[in-house]
Image (cartoon, helix red, strand yellow):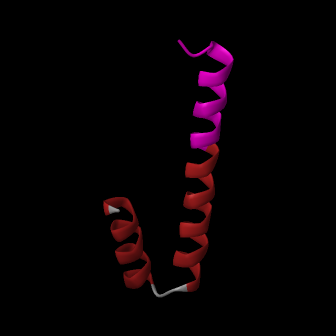
Amino acid sequence: MSSPAVLLAAVVGLTDHAHTQERRGLALSAALPPETGEYDRATERAE
């Protein structure tokens, strides 16, 4: 069995990674036309 500390570290790592991806997506959409930004976000979610 994994210890609670290991599980917590994994969850925090995954959450931090998701937030990094979200920030990058928002930065990209801000630099692109609105239609392209929406398409990119939908594509990113699908992947």
Overall secondary structure of the magenta section: helix
Residue at image position (41%, 68%) is 41
Q: Is residue 19 above or below residue 2?
A: below
Segment tinted magenta in the rendering: 1-15
Which residue extends farthest left?
46
Location of the C terminus by quadrant is bottom left
Residue at image position (38%, 74%) is 38
Residue 35 lies within the magenta run = no
Q: Position of residue 22 (x, y in %)?
A: 55, 59
Which residue extends farthest bottom?
33
Hey, which quadrant is residue 11 in on the image?
top right
Hey, which quadrant is residue 7 in on the image?
top right
Hey, which quadrant is residue 16 in on the image?
top right
Q: Nearer the viewer, residue 8 or 40?
A: 8
Residue 12 lies within the magenta run = yes
Q: Give the side of residue 5 with respect to residue 25, left or right.
A: right
Residue at image position (61%, 73%) is 27
Q: Give the side of residue 39 with respect to residue 9, left or right.
A: left
Q: Position of residue 23 (x, y in %)?
A: 61, 62
Q: Position of residue 21 (x, y in %)?
A: 56, 60
Q: Is residue 9 above or below residue 18?
A: above
Q: Position of residue 44 (x, y in %)?
A: 40, 66
* Number of marks in the rendered image: 0
Q: Give the side of residue 28 with respect to residue 37, left or right.
A: right
